Image (cartoon, rainbow, N blue to C red):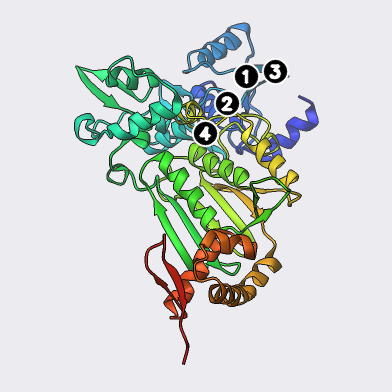
């Protein structure tokens, strides 16, 4: 430390990164506070108001300070620097937070070391990943009453796991349950995957899907909340997207036509899975959201980026917030390889010659897929034309099927079904007889 730097520190006074102390009393709580924060400097031999008092620097003093750092839990890394009769103790920001001393847990609030209260400590452990939601045991979940055997059997089938052992043993091997005093006790991963009624356990595990008219949330055209189980939530969200995203068909001469979605379903599926797998399940005031606007599709996951992952490394490095949940999704083939989902999403968008996904990082991680807004407005205007063409077809071919109409009009079967339902409700057409062998009747409008 240079003389000019010391002068500047004294003039600026104590702060978030600087602490003045005349003696070593309570230096352990200052070390802990800095280690739990962004690190900092403790200047021994300077009073609170910045006056130099000096301290006798000896090997015994430095050894004493090093022992204090080592006796913290876990040990704190420090470096000491002498400047005349001032000893500067450099405290690194800890890599294994939170840290504590004999007096408790402390954090740095402005220029002060403040003792952490119970809830602060809990939040700290959660934010640092020391406590994982998916690994927490839930004693209120009753294996005999609340466990869904059918969901479990379906999982085993999809994952290709042979059920050689009894169900409790398989559950324990999967890391979703454990044996305690002869009882099968579930953790939250097991509940998210295999609960008969997930709503009875957790409400914030819901995936909310919404379709809006326009580019804001003012007019809701359709909304669904899914909370059956964590896997079904993904599947239902994808069905919702497929119902509301236009597709077109390409004919390349082969017997089977090629269906091309406006936004690649593969990229959307990866985004939905990522949102469900990597969300912060300790945050109970928000759901995973899948929202369709005229100009974009937004898929958002509560909790922001996982601790330790920087924005610049997003999509390049993998840091798992819910490793247990991710493991089961990987076993099912929903996740092919850890850390490659974002890369696949970007590749699918590039291959489709679409705009790159806009990833936004706040208290949520949001993937924004841009849509062709003009095409959406045009599609609404042309829906009337489609209805007219359907009526013309039915007048000519009363036995025509919906798939045949879709092929002739170059529309998706879903789009044709929607128009057919509108025409039926309006009284323009009527179905006579069953689906097989029946026919369409076009009513005369007075």
| Disc 2 target residue | 22
Q: Is residue 117 above or below residue 216?
A: above
Instruction: Residue 307 in the image: state x and y as whole percent.
Output: 56, 33
Tags 1 and 3 in contact by the CB under 8 Å rule?
A: no
Q: Residue at x 60, y 56 (%)?
A: 297
Badge 2 marks a residue whose secondary structure is: loop
Tags 2 and 4 in contact by the CB under 8 Å rule?
A: no
Front position among marks 1 and 3: 3
Mark 2 Cα within 10 Å, few/some/many (few <14, many 20+)? some
| Disc 1 target residue | 55
* Label 3 – label 2 distance at C-alpha: 16 Å
* Label 2 – label 4 distance at C-alpha: 60 Å
Where residue 81 is drawn, which disc sits there?
A: 3
Q: Is residue 125 above or below residue 282?
A: above
Badge 4 marks a residue whose secondary structure is: loop
Query: Tag 2 or tag 1, which sits nearer the N-term?
Result: 2
* Label 1 – label 3 distance at C-alpha: 13 Å
Query: Tag 2 or tag 3, which sits nearer the N-term?
Result: 2
Instruction: Residue 28 in the image: state x and y as whole percent.
Output: 50, 22
Tags 1 and 2 in contact by the CB under 8 Å rule?
A: yes
Query: Tag 4 or tag 2, which sits nearer the N-term?
Result: 2
The answer to whether 101 appears left or right of 254 in the picture is left
Badge 1 marks a residue whose secondary structure is: loop
* Label 4 – label 1 distance at C-alpha: 63 Å
Mark 1 Cα within 10 Å, few/some/many (few <14, many 20+)? some
Residue nearer the viewer, 33 or 64: 33
Where residue 334 is drawn, which disc sits there?
A: 4
Instruction: Residue 292 in the image: state x and y as whole percent.
Output: 56, 59
Q: Residue at x 52, y 11 (%)?
A: 67
Q: Residue at x 52, y 34 (%)?
A: 334
Residue nearer the viewer, 99 or 282: 282
Q: Residue at x 37, y 35 (%)?
A: 193
């Amino acid at each position: 430390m240079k003389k000019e730097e010391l002068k500047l520190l004294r003039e600026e006074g104590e702060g978030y990164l600087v602490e003045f102390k005349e003696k070593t009393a309570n230096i352990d709580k200052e070390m802990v506070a800095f280690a739990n924060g962004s690190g900092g400097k403790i200047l021994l031999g300077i009073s609170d108001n910045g006056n130099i008092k000096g301290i006798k620097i000896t090997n015994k003093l430095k050894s004493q300070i090093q022992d204090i750092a080592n006796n913290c839990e876990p040990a704190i890394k420090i470096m000491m620097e002498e400047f005349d009769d001032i000893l500067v103790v450099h405290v690194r920001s800890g890599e294994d937070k939170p840290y504590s001393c004999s007096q408790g847990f402390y954090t740095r609030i402005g220029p002060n070391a403040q003792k952490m209260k119970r809830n602060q400590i809990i939040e700290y452990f959660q934010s640092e990943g020391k406590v994982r939601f998916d690994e927490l045991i839930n004693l209120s979940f009753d294996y005999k009453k609340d466990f869904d055997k059918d969901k479990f059997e379906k999982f085993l089938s999809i994952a290709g796991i042979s059920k050689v052992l009894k169900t409790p043993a398989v559950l324990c091997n999967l890391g979703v349950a454990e044996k305690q005093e002869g009882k099968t006790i579930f953790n939250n991963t097991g509940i998210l995957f295999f609960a008969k009624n997930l709503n009875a356990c957790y409400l914030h595990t819901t995936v909310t899907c919404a379709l809006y008219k326009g580019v804001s949330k003012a007019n809701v055209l359709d909304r669904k909340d899914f909370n059956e189980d964590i896997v079904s939530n993904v599947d239902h969200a994808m069905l919702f997207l497929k119902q509301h995203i236009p597709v077109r068909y390409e004919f390349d001469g082969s017997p089977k036509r090629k269906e091309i979605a406006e936004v690649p379903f593969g990229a959307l599926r990866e985004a939905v899975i990522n949102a469900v797998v990597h969300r912060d399940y300790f945050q109970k005031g928000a759901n995973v959201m899948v929202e369709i606007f005229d100009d974009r599709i937004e898929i958002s996951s509560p909790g922001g980026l996982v601790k330790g992952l920087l924005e610049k490394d997003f999509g390049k490095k993998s840091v798992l917030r819910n490793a247990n949940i991710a493991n089961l999704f990987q076993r099912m083939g929903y996740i092919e390889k850890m850390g490659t989902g974002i890369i696949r999403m970007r590749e699918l968008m590039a291959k489709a010659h679409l705009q790159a996904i806009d990833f936004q990082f706040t208290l949520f991680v949001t993937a924004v897929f841009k849509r062709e807004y003009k095409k959406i407005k045009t599609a609404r205007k042309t829906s009337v034309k489609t209805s007219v063409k359907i009526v013309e077809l039915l007048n000519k071919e009363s036995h025509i099927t919906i798939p045949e109409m879709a092929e002739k009009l170059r529309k998706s079967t879903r789009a044709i079904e929607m128009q057919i339902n509108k025409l039926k409700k309006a009284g323009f057409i009527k179905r006579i007889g069953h689906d097989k062998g029946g026919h369409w009747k076009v009513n005369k409008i007075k």
